[in-house]
Amino acid sequence: MDYPQLLAPILDFLPCPTPAAWIDEARNPARLPLLLTDHMVCELKAAQTAMLLVRKYIADKQSAEALLEWLKPYEAFTFREGPEPDFVALHKLIGKSVMPKTDDPWGRQLIDSMVLLIKEELHHFWQVREIMLARDIPYVKITASRYAKGMLKEVRTHEPLTLIDKLICGAYIEARSCERFAALAPYLDADLQKFYLSLLRSEARHYQDYLMLAQQVAQEDISPRVKFFGEVEALLITTPDAEFRFHSGVPV
């Protein structure tokens, strides 16, 4: 895989690189359990975000229920309300066959890209879980970082502007994940390095899918709004942060 070529548009899109202070903290072996735990939960949150978009903007009652069922076992495990399920078996249940048929090109694009995103993010979820099990890292519930909340609080409150802003936020979250996988990989052991680099291709496509969907639904050029959220994202990444997480700012 040509990683520099894959990363180039992401690095152009993001307003700033990850600060060296975050990488220094993240490469500390003592931080690995927390980092993997937060990474696993972030994969679930990415799937939840995609699911909510499909449920709100395109799904009918039957497909909305199917979407909820896909995520329930992952959520029950993550929030400590259920046992550890067979993630491999669960993964086989996810597909577009239960989604509604639509003649709307944007709706079709939303279903195609978001169902694939859900499938990939949940696959990554159990890949991280397998790594934790192999390394005897117990799963312990942790608090969320300020990152996603910090961007989402700037989302406008009337449609279709709400949708456009949420899609742009999704693009930044996916792009930053991709950039951090690549930034951290050189400091990880061989197995983890291979895994993190393997995530780059799908994560790189995810941010582009979000941006494309945002521009398609907008009546005007979204560049000013993308720039606005870029400034919000940069502030969250480059300012001191009391909590250390996968998307946190500069460690205090």
Image (cartoon, grey):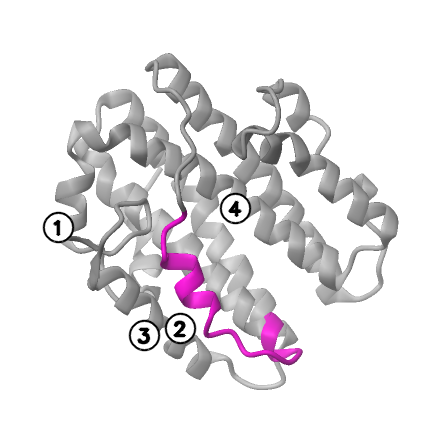
10 Å neighbourhood of mark 1: few (<14), some, or many (≥20)?
few
Q: Please name the residue shown 34% across and 19% down the image.
A: 137
Q: Are marks 1 and 2 in contact (CB under 8 Å)?
A: no
For disc 1, the marked residue is 21
For disc 3, the marked residue is 231
* SS at mark 4 in the image: helix
User: At label 4, which amino acid type do we have?
Assistant: Lys
Q: Position of residue 47 (x, y in %)?
A: 57, 45
* SS at mark 3 in the image: helix
Among all residues in the image, which is located at the extreme bottom?
220
User: At label 1, which amino acid type do we have?
Assistant: Ala
* SS at mark 1 in the image: helix
Q: Is residue 154 magenta?
A: yes
Q: Please name the residue shown 35% across and 60% down the image.
A: 9
Q: Please name the residue shown 27% across and 49% down the image.
A: 243
Real-space Cα separation, disc 1 to disc 2, in angstroms: 23 Å
Magenta-highlighted residues: 144-163
Q: Is residue 95 visible?
A: no
Q: Are marks 2 and 3 in contact (CB under 8 Å)?
A: yes
Q: Position of residue 70 (x, y in %)?
A: 70, 36
For disc 4, the marked residue is 45
Residue 134, placed above or below residue 15: above
User: At label 3, which amino acid type do we have?
Assistant: Glu
10 Å neighbourhood of mark 3: few (<14), some, or many (≥20)?
some
